């Protein structure tokens, strides 16, 4: 189930850069921008001087702006769907308790799980009907049809891990993308650790039952809806670039462990409230967590999408998912060691504060425009090397005046022409 869920998110995310880069207004702006650069090159005869617009390090590309907008709306709608399913599931559980009290608890839970799975299945039907295929060649399986079923499965698994390794080698050569992946590794570990530690603290230290914790989950999810739609407005109002918005979200998340640590202050202890001494105090922190997650979920994946070489979206979002899930065990393991040694969860808040702050320096040095240009050049280089059978495929040299950069931008248009779309 986890493999299927993770794969679906990888494929879903891989559409994001394509939706942004192929939006009509974005294509017009990109064409105008590259036409001006090409004209300047012809008149000046200096490729190096005009290889990058002067304002690229100070402005956000239209594609990244639109990608963030699409991602924010998608995350917001996803949170809305999650809240609806939680409320319906709670209603079903209460209904079964009232009208079928003799039913075993396991049967009630199975009924709810069946309902959730049914909704998931029905929700995939519109996608299967209306979602268009991503451009790019299909996986070559002609030479594998004669193989046995077990051998085919083994071949696919081997192919997948080889593709991951190739993607890792390419990612290492893209400096901005590599920096972001390290920052995302640390950030995703912090997110998973904060969530798990908060639930554990609520159950053990605050003595909260299942229903209050369920209400906490709904509170955080509703706050996530607000965050997903509010962060683009806040970023536009304060003139924040995408990576600066991510940093702002990280700073806000620091409130959670810092608030837990002030419970050590003697005068706060004397008050009997503050520093998570009362159960109700965790709900405002749940609001903060949800609001931050609404921003991080939308901005991180859209920012990362701009650093991916065109045509390699699925492969690099798979690496994004591996980095996310691969880090999720580190922080909780350290928290577990701290709890075993000290006998209390509160000291773990100091570790959480450090873990959340670690990615901030890396995020501050990121340059989305430089990463975007590097990704385009990498896509062209891979194409000239004859890469095929994967997400990055061969590019044709049209001999246009835009050079490699223009060839990368024309990748999707040429593929649509080949496929007759």
Image (cartoon, rainbow, N blue to C red):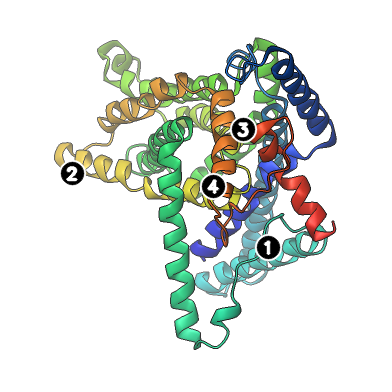
Q: CA distance from mark 1 to mark 2?
A: 39 Å
Question: Which sits in the foreground, 388 or 236?
Answer: 388
Which badge, 3 or 1, comes first in the chain's sequence? Answer: 1
- Residue at the image point whose x is 33% and y is 30% from the top: 355
Whether the residues at callouts 3 and 2 have beta carbons within 8 Å, the answer is no
**Element under disc 4:** helix
Q: Quadrant of residue 184?
A: top left
Give the residue number, with chain letter if any, for mark 1.
Answer: 120
Q: Earlier in the sequence, mark 2 or mark 4?
A: 2
Residue on which disc 4 sits: 382
Find residue 64 and report its image quarter. Answer: top right
Comes first in the chain, label 3 or label 4: 3
- Give me the C-alpha separation between circle 3 and circle 2: 33 Å
Q: Residue at x 84, y 56 (%)?
A: 421
Q: Which residue is mark 2?
A: 340
Q: Nearer the viewer, mark 2 or mark 4?
A: 4
Pick the front one: 46 or 304: 46
Q: Quick one: label 4, few (<14), some, or many (20+) residues within 10 Å?
A: some
Left or right placement of residue 251 versus residue 34 in this view: left
Residue at 25 percent of width and 41 percent of height = 334
In the rendered image, residue 166, in percent from the top left (x then y), is placed at: 44, 53
């Amino acid at each position: 189930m986890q493999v299927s869920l993770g794969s679906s998110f990888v494929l879903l995310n891989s559409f994001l850069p394509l939706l942004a880069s192929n939006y009509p207004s974005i294509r017009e702006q990109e064409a105008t921008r590259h036409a001006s650069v090409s004209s300047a090159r012809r008149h000046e005869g200096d490729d190096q001087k005009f290889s990058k617009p002067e304002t690229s390090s100070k402005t956000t590309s239209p594609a990244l702006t639109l990608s963030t907008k699409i991602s924010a709306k998608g995350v917001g709608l996803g949170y809305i769907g999650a809240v609806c399913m939680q409320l319906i599931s709670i209603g079903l559980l209460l209904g079964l308790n009232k009208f079928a009290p003799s039913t075993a608890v396991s049967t009630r839970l199975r009924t709810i799980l069946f309902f959730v799975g049914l909704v998931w299945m029905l929700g995939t039907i519109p996608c299967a009907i209306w979602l268009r295929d991503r451009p790019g060649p299909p996986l070559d399986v002609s030479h594998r049809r004669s193989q046995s079923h077990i051998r085919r499965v083994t071949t696919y698994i081997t192919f997948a891990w080889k593709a991951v390794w190739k993607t890792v080698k390419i990612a290492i050569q893209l400096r901005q993308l590599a920096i972001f992946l390290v920052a995302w590794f640390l950030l995703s570990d912090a997110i998973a650790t904060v969530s798990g530690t908060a639930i554990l603290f609520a159950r053990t230290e605050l003595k909260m039952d299942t229903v209050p914790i369920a209400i906490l989950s709904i509170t955080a999810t509703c706050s996530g809806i607000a965050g997903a739609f509010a962060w683009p407005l806040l970023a536009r109002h304060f003139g924040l670039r995408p990576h600066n918005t991510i940093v702002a979200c990280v700073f806000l998340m620091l409130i959670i462990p810092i608030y837990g640590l002030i419970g050590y202050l003697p005068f706060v202890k004397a008050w009997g409230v503050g520093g998570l001494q009362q159960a109700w105090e965790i709900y405002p922190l749940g609001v903060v967590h949800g609001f931050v997650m609404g921003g991080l979920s939308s901005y991180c994946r859209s920012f990362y999408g701009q650093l991916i070489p065109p045509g390699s979206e699925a492969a690099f979002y798979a690496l994004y998912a591996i980095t996310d899930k691969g880090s999720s065990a580190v922080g909780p393991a350290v928290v577990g060691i701290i709890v075993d040694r000290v006998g209390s969860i509160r000291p773990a808040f100091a570790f959480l504060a450090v873990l959340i702050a670690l990615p901030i320096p890396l995020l501050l040095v990121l340059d989305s425009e430089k990463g975007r240009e590097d990704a385009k050049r990498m896509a062209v280089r891979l194409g000239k090397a004859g890469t095929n059978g994967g997400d990055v495929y061969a590019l044709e040299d049209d001999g246009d005046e835009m050079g490699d950069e223009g060839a990368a931008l024309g990748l999707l248009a040429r593929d649509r022409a080949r496929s007759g779309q």
